[in-house]
Amino acid sequence: MAKASASVRIPVSADKVWQLAGGFLSLPDWLPLIAKSVSDQGGQVRHLTTQDGAKISERLETFDNQGRTYSYSITQGPFPVTDYLATLKVSADGDQASVVEWSGTFTPAGVSDAEAEALFKGVYEGGLAALKGNF
């Protein structure tokens, strides 16, 4: 099982960051790569369309609003991995700052662990930089 992670400190309260990033369907609000998110199965599944037209389906696995975290799996997508499970977590770093962590585990399919890890590390780092840019 391979894994990747990234984190960013944002000089804004954790509650404010969670307001933007904490909705399972809110990716288009802060992640430029995602053009559209469509809810399915009562909000438990999101069907994403990227800016270049790729389709990704993800299932919400856990959600903890008080803990400011959720986990999701990819059920369909263009990535060379299986058994993908990721977590997004927003933690307070004092009253007026937060740390956002995005991490995932997965099994590479047709690529090396290092290639799959680099791919998702890049997604997480780019996504968190975009999130920070909203503040």
Image: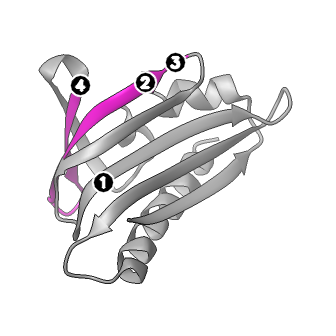
User: Which SS class for mark 2?
Assistant: strand
Q: Residue at x 41, y 47 (%)?
A: 86
Q: Earlier in the sequence, mark 3 or mark 1?
A: 3
Badge 3 density bin: few <14, some 14–19, many ≥20, Cα 10 Å: few
Residue 84 has which mark? 1
Residue 123 has which mark? none
Residue 65 has which mark? 3
Q: Which residue is mark 2?
A: 63
Residue 44 has which mark? 4
Q: Amino acid at mark 1?
A: Tyr
Query: Where on the picture, by quarter, is residue 123?
Result: bottom left
Q: Earlier in the sequence, mark 2 or mark 4?
A: 4
Q: Amino acid at mark 4?
A: Gln
Q: Residue at x 23, y 55 (%)?
A: 50
Could you give the CA–CA distance between mark 1 and mark 4, rounded to whole angstroms?
16 Å
Could you give the CA–CA distance between mark 3 and mark 4, rounded to whole angstroms?
15 Å
User: Which SS class for mark 1?
Assistant: strand
Q: Position of residue 118 (x, y in %)?
A: 44, 76
Quadrant in which the C terminus is drawn = top right
